[in-house]
């Protein structure tokens, strides 16, 4: 299961209101090979879910995740920070053994 904090949900809803995202209603979260720790997170807005996607809804946000990525993301919470120590989305992933300093990649 994937979760999203209220702050991240509010930010995602605001981003979906942008005219460039017209027609898109899903936030896809996935894991790709790469990054300084071996695996990296990716987020995209999409208009349609694929039949093999795992779907989650939390705090009014529709989340999509492919089955391969879900193995790495079970129990993960997407958060958002707008503080002085860094602005942007952050993944709180209990499966990650270590993360890089930027927080965009991890390893198991």
Image (tube, helix red, strand yellow):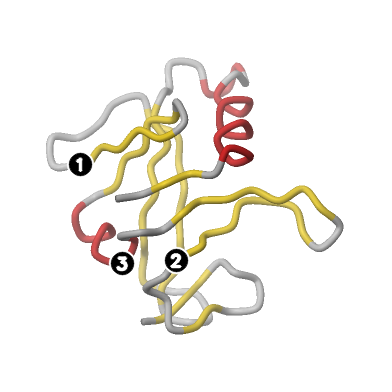
Q: Where in the figure is residue 102, as x and y percent of width and height?
A: 65, 71
25 to 39, vertically: above or below = above
Q: Where in the figure is residue 39, as x and y percent of width and height?
A: 41, 73
SS for callout 3: helix
Query: Which is more N-terminal, label 3 or label 1?
Result: 1
29 to 37, vertically: above or below = above
Q: Nearer the viewer, mark 3 or mark 2?
A: 2
**Residue at x-position 35% and y-position 59%:** 75
Which residue is disc 1 drawn over? 53
SS for callout 1: loop
C-alpha gap between disc 1 and disc 2: 20 Å
Q: Where in the figure is residue 36, as x and y percent of width and height?
A: 53, 81
Residue 72: image tag: 3
Query: Which is more N-terminal, label 2 or label 3?
Result: 3
Quadrant of the rendered structure where residue 74 is?
A: bottom left
Q: Nearer the viewer, mark 1 or mark 2?
A: 2
Q: Where in the figure is residue 95, as x and y percent of width and height?
A: 37, 73
Q: Quadrant of the C terminus?
A: bottom left
SS for callout 2: loop
**Residue at x-position 48% and y-position 44%:** 4
In the figure, is residue 33 to the left or right of 22?
A: left
Judge the density around disc 2: few (<14), some (14-19), many (≥20) Cα neighbours within 10 Å.
some
C-alpha gap between disc 3 and disc 2: 8 Å
As rendered, which of 2 and 43 lies closer to the eye? 2
Residue 2: image tag: none
Quadrant of the rendered structure where residue 86 is?
A: bottom right
C-alpha gap between disc 1 and disc 3: 15 Å
Which residue is disc 2 drawn over? 93
């Amino acid at each position: 299961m994937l979760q999203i904090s209220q702050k991240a949900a509010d930010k995602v809803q605001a981003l979906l209101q942008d005219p460039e995202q017209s027609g898109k209603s899903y936030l896809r979260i996935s894991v790709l090979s790469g990054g300084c720790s071996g695996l990296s997170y990716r987020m995209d807005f999409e208009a349609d879910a694929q039949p093999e996607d795992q779907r989650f809804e939390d705090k009014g946000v529709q989340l999509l995740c492919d089955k391969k990525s879900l193995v790495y993301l079970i129990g993960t919470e997407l958060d958002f920070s707008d503080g002085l120590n860094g602005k942007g989305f952050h993944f709180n992933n209990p499966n990650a053994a270590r993360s890089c300093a930027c927080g965009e990649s991890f390893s198991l």
